[in-house]
Image: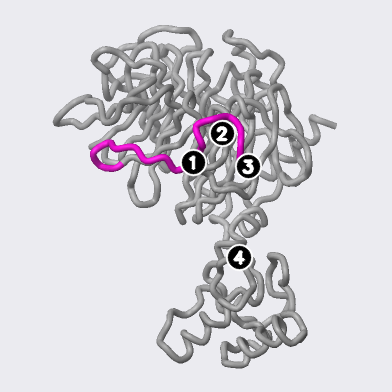
Amino acid sequence: MKGFLAQFLTAAWASLSAAEPPEEVPVQFVRGDSNADGERDLSDDVFLLEHFFLGGPAPDCLAAADSDNDGELAISDPIYHLAHLFLAGAPPEAPYPGCGVAATTGSLPCAAYPPCEFETLASSYSLLTTVAGKGLRADDLNEWDPSFEGELATGAELSNPHLAMGDLAGNIYIADKEAHAIRKVTPAGRIFTVAGTNSAGDGPDTPGPATERSLNSPNGLWVREDGTLYLLDLLNSKIRRVDRTGRMTTLISVPGGIVGGRGLWVRADESLVYFSSFTELKRWTPEEGVDTFAAGFTGLGNIAMDPEGRLVATDREAHRVYRLSGDGTKTPIAGNGTTVGGGDGWPALETGLNEVRAVCFRRDGSYFLGTHRGSQVWFVDTRGIIHLFLDGRRGSHDGDGEPFRNPGLKVSEVRAVTLDSFENLLVTENDAGFVRMVVRR
């Protein structure tokens, strides 16, 4: 049964990867909440009346403001809503009082409705599946066997993978740290080595075949849409590039070494690189070389760039996520600095994120987080409210082939989360070594 399920999910993933990027799903909303503050009260009608008569702003979600559901935004809408609030009039039609989409055709458009942002996002994802790894061993040893090469990725043993990223062709690249290699999983679900020799070493810095150049504990990865990849070769203290022809060269040799690095970000023209080194964020430019961009962290995890071009870093040991300004000043955006408190539906800054390590952004500025010790994947909406996306605990691995929102403990020790070119969510997790995918509809 498991073999059939793996083949079925592989075929489904291949068809998805070959398709065009997914269309946007309908925005969910609550009818009657004209000012989109998450409450249905007098302020909604004041908001509309100010729009009609005092030049106030129009609602972002016209459908939510259409209280009488007649397909028009008019004075009849606040009258209808006021009658419901104060004269025992009929309530607005669905979606009401909870989030949903309009049940009738011809409804007014809804550009955005932040209080239902998570429900809209969740409706755009479907199944949870395993992309790579079979999870038989949970240790710090090299588990790679040559027989895995070219076979189904779900039958290959990964060795403490630290990050997975996708390209536009639907390939997924994995930093297989303890096996000292970078793997590629094709849309057909086959796994191949694309960099490293599967044994520790320090390959030449000059250009040459990537699979003939040794690496030593690569645990950072950055992939461009065209399949060019960059890797953080940790114990060699180097950032290396592998081009589309499979040739690897050293882009940066880091003076003084890299300590506990895993986060990596590279500008498309290679004019700027950021990477983490335990308590410091490093920056490299061709003109200035390597310097310290920001310091004072407790134990860095991964890094990401938000849609406005601002660097964001997870401080795993401090249980916080920081946004950095151009001068390296840190501003916390998620995590309360402890492992407890807050939770689903709470402000992200009031929620305990137990060893938060993973971060990736969506185009609207919302983002996913993953906690290592907490074994959870979270979603933070554009209002800064956090929502539990995937639950888990250490050692759990469940839910393959099922809707991701089904109850249960699905993931363990999340190391990284990334979005591929098709908005599928990739989750690198588990000491036993798995890469999971939450499939975008």
Q: Assess disc 2: are there few (<14), some (14-19) or many (≥20) residues with their C-alpha within 10 Å of its C-alpha.
A: many
Q: Position of residue 382 (x, y in %)?
A: 49, 55
Q: For marks 3 and 4, give the CA distance.
A: 18 Å
Q: Assess disc 3: are there few (<14), some (14-19) or many (≥20) residues with their C-alpha within 10 Å of its C-alpha.
A: some
Disc 1 to disc 2: CB gap under 8 Å: yes
Residue type at numbered disc 2: Leu
Q: Position of residue 312 (x, y in %)?
A: 39, 39
Q: For marks 1 and 2, give the CA distance.
A: 8 Å
Q: Under tag 1, what secondary structure?
A: strand
Residue 335 among magenta residues = yes
Residue at the disc numbered 3: 343
Residue type at numbered disc 3: Gly
Q: Position of residue 199 (x, y in %)?
A: 48, 8
Disc 1 to disc 3: CB gap under 8 Å: no
Residue at the disc numbered 4: 38
Disc 4 to disc 1: CB gap under 8 Å: no
Which comes sooner in the sequence, label 1 or label 3?
1
**Which image quadrant is residue 408 in?**
top right
Highlighted magenta segment, given as a residue range = 325-343
Disc 4 to disc 2: CB gap under 8 Å: no
What secondary structure is the stretch in magenta mostly built from?
loop
